[in-house]
Amino acid sequence: MYVVGLTGGIGSGKSTFAALLVERGAQVIDADQLGRDALRPGAPAWHSVLDTFGDQILAAGTMEIDRARLADIVFADSRRLAALNAIVHPVIFGGIADDLDRLRGTDEIVIVDVALLSETGLDRGMDCIVAVTTNRQLRTKRLQRDRGMTLSQIQARMGAQKPPEELEAMADVVVRNNGDLEDLAREADRVWAELERRRDAAR
Ligand code: ADP
């Protein structure tokens, strides 16, 4: 198993790039997905979030946490963000560890897709770090177009993440995603060959 930490700020194209690497043979562990699973109704973290934030964060008439509302609350207040992270991060870390245990001893290249790689200390367990970076204007445009986010929502989330220059400085491999999707697919070919080379050299 060769473990690759994939990082990048919101809207940089990190998930799109992870999907391109899966097409080329990678296994992926998606921290966002683990976080969503953690907040499913009835899960332990769901109970803790309700205790901490109140049932105002449930979507009207359901037991589902309204993730957009929760995000608006925590990205406006760093203490509340820390409180949410204290509940959800341990569950995400546990999920990542379980998936890595399952893949240990195989020849797989495993992509751990996680926005806050160094902030959470997860970078220390990686064999290699890939950063996907994109200029702010393009990220903003893509998030407005594809996810219907408002400018203030985008700015709040970007403000809680490391700037692209810092991500690039900590990465072994940098992918600049300022072109179109065909450019990104070409980058995926390049990076996949590089990851195979590094995996084989580490054997
Ligand atoms: P992240 O996971 O980093 O938040 P995503 O991979 O979800 O970002 O990408 C954000 C949005 O931008 C998605 O809708 C995606 O389809 C789009 N996108 C990503 N890369 C490109 C690109 N090179 N050209 C056009 N759209 C892109």
Image (cartoon, rainbow, N blue to C red):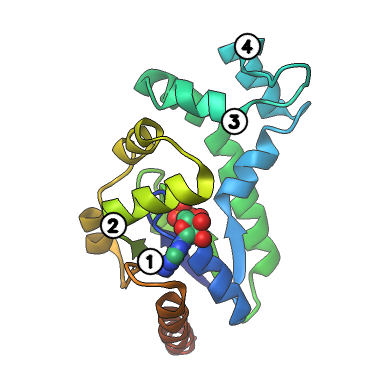
Q: Nearer the viewer, mark 2 or mark 1?
A: 2
Tags 2 and 1 touching, CB below 8 Å: no
Tags 4 and 2 touching, CB below 8 Å: no
Q: Quadrant of residue 134?
A: bottom left
Horizontal side, residue 3 vs residue 57: left or right:
left
Distance, label 4 to label 2, CA atoms, is 35 Å
Say whether residue 141 is visible. yes
Distance, label 1 to label 3, CA atoms, is 28 Å
Earlier-in-chain disc, 1 versus 3: 3
Horizontal side, residue 24 vs residue 190: left or right:
right
Distance, label 2 to label 1, CA atoms, is 9 Å
Residue 58, position in %: x, y?
A: 68, 19
Q: Nearer the viewer, mark 1 or mark 4?
A: 4
Q: Quadrant of residue 70?
A: top right
Question: Amino acid under label 2?
Answer: Leu
Question: Amino acid under label 4?
Answer: Gln
Point 44% across, 45% down: residue: 144
Q: Which residue is mark 2?
A: 167
